[in-house]
Image: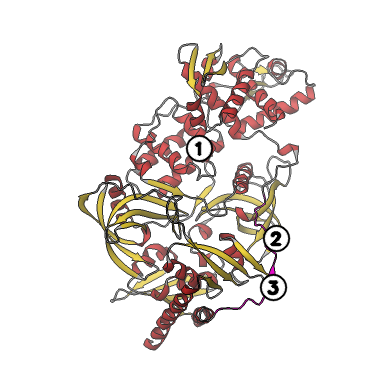
Amino acid sequence: MGQRDDDKLVRQLSLVAFLMAQQRPVTAEEIHEAVEGYGGMSEQAFLRRFYSDRSELEGVGLKLAVERPSDDPFQGDLYAMPPENYYLPPIEFDEAELSALHTSLYLLEGQFAYAEPLRLALQHLTLGRPSPLDDHAARTVAVNLLGSRHTAAVSSHLIKVESAISRRKTIRFRYYSIGRDDLGDREVDPYSLLYMAGNWYLVGFAHDREDLRCFRLSRIQGRITFKTRAEHDFPPPREVDLSRYRDRAPWQLADPVGTAVIEVSPTIAWWVDQMFGAQGEIEGRPDGSAVFRTEYGGERELISWVLGLGAEAAVVEPPGLRDAAIAALEQLRTRHSTMPKRRAKALPRIAESVAADEASDDPSERVVPVERISRLLALMTRLLAACGRSYEAEVPCAELRAELNLTQDALEEDLTLLNLINFGGGCYALFAQVEDGEVVVQKEVYGDQFSRPARLSPLEAKALLWALDFVGGRLPLVGEESLASARRKVEDAVGKESSTGVELGTVQTASETVGAVLARAVREDQVLEIDYWNESRGEVTTRTIEPHMLMNARDAWYLVAHCRRAGEQRTFRLDRIRGATALGETFTRRPEVPAVPYQPWGPASPTGPHAHIARVWCSPAVARWLAEEHPSVERFSDGSIIAEIPYASQEWLVQEITKHRGEAVLYAPEDLRPAVAGSAERILGRYATAAAGR
């Protein structure tokens, strides 16, 4: 943050302080003369910066009231900051709702693109209330939302896109289209943000295609810029149906080309119905098997899904799709029956990088970040509230740093700026300095007017509502009514215009009945008996488990537990649990079952065993997609690569290789190659048996 930005911050907050202190409408001339930062400017320079400051303050949620006297045609506009335009309407949360709000922050800390606005919003809402972060629910749930390609650049893109959506600004950017392997310029009217499976997407009207399109933010290269300096570039969009992206299976994102008929075994028929029944029709058979019919537009995606189910599923129709699946399996078997030879010339290894979002060179786009202004307001309110009715208070620096997520240097810099607010206008609010690890604050003449929280900025309101939507709609916990009621109160206070503009993809979790049993068992330390489908082994087994923690990883939920049959920790995916029964027995939590971040290949802990690494050759047909998820260690002139894929389970690795239709070939470990070939052989046997039966 440079000196120029500091000056702007002081000027904008001094303007607010001056208007709050006057408690009457004032003229532009009075503002020019009295407010710190405007003195010495020419009239034109003052008007230009004054209107710019007004616009930025509105972005923080503080809107100046403007009135024009009717009795004097020569009198200019009068400006004021009515209390209702500054103060956040009081919200009375009960303890359960307050706990739900803090649990949201606890779960999303470090996993949420809008973590800082969310933290500031909760500071405003819960001022003076204790933080119940020792809540048992928070300690038995963990969230891992961000995909492997989430970077600082993606977070920067999010803020820019969110601003463009709210301001209806057309944006321009360079975009890598992975399907066409093409990098080109895009011009888009942004309508909404979409979160799915750990990735963020922009949905908007693409000018080059003259149609609605979806763009993955991690594939935007360089910076995003506004097309014009106009206030708005396009009219409010009509109701946009995002179900095409949000509610459809991966093979349904493209325009449909036909209907596939897929036979599924009794082992997984229930699971297909539970997870994909809305994307097709399922017809059960007396033996427990079923026929699943689904429209598809992406042949590659559909075949990959079916092959990933192993011998539990087979394509029946159309014949072309069935032949493509069989050809993929034959290629998979052949390529893993002998060691493949590298025929393409290896290229020099290059470091993989993601283009950072550069700062805009256009001065018209340089604005003080909303979070910085909101943070200063939150800090000022926090310090003045600590004074209460006295004129002085001491607040531990460590407490403020924890509440606002600040370093000591940043805290002291913020205090310096607060001390400068309206220094020249005489409307002092406070004076604060650090002494022996504490902030000593003295309340000045106008301090009482800032001891109540300011309104939430639009970004803070959106961050809070989005977090409540995410946690409330996805946590498999009992007690979601507290989150729902807290959300209603927040929306009533901030206004329905603070709609989040963010859509959530489908989450993969257990059925409602099973989820309720699991949530209660985790919270109350109850022993469970579960029927679990092991996808990689293709069997349903009954386990007695001690459930310790629920974990979210990229839109799927997992249960970390001690499995009594295995005698050690196991992780179970919730949507694979067919049934769960509490046995009426409680257990003592085991310290050897750690709460570790969960990845698709298994648990990863700094103190525990690391995942193994497989070296996989990827043909040009799949190289781009696999390189996006995994580091590539060698590249070849034909577009193929060697990728490194971590795995903890051999069965999982075989299943993962099988999904890629023979276009991914296991190089190492060599002793697992026969297992991949054997998997292809078993699935081909399923197709042969089905053909003979028909």
Residue type, numbered disc 2: Leu
Q: Nearer the viewer, residue 489 or 198?
A: 198
Mark 3 sits on what residue? 345
Residue at image coords 57%, 51%: 150
Q: Give the residue at x 66% y 28%.
A: 54
* Range drawn in magenta: 339-355
The local crowd at label 1, few if under 14, some if 14 to 19, many if 20 or more residues have their Cα within 10 Å, is many
Up-down: is 67 above or below 110? above
- Residue under circle 2? 183
Dot 2 crowding, Cα within 10 Å, few <14, some 14–19, many 20+: some
> Residue 510: image x %, image y %?
35, 57
What amino acid type should be assigned to the residue bearing mark 1? Answer: Leu
Q: Are marks 3 and 2 in contact (CB under 8 Å)?
A: no
The answer to whether 359 is drawn above or below residue 517 in the figure is above
Tell me the element at label 2. strand
Contact between labelled residues 2 and 1, with CB atoms less than 8 Å apart = no
Q: Quadrant of residue 348?
A: bottom right
Amino acid on which the number 3 mark rests in the picture: Lys
Q: Residues within 10 Å of mark 3 (few under 14, many from 20)?
A: few
Q: Is residue 490 magenta?
A: no
Which of the 4 image quarters holds residue 620?
Answer: bottom right
Tag 3 secondary structure: loop
**Of the residues under marks 3 and 2, which one precedes in the sequence?**
2
- State the residue lying farthest toward the left: 584
Q: Which mark is residue 118?
A: 1
Identify the residue at image location x=59%, y=29%. 410
Residue 13's x, y, as percent? 62, 23
Q: Is residue 669 left or right of residue 539?
A: right
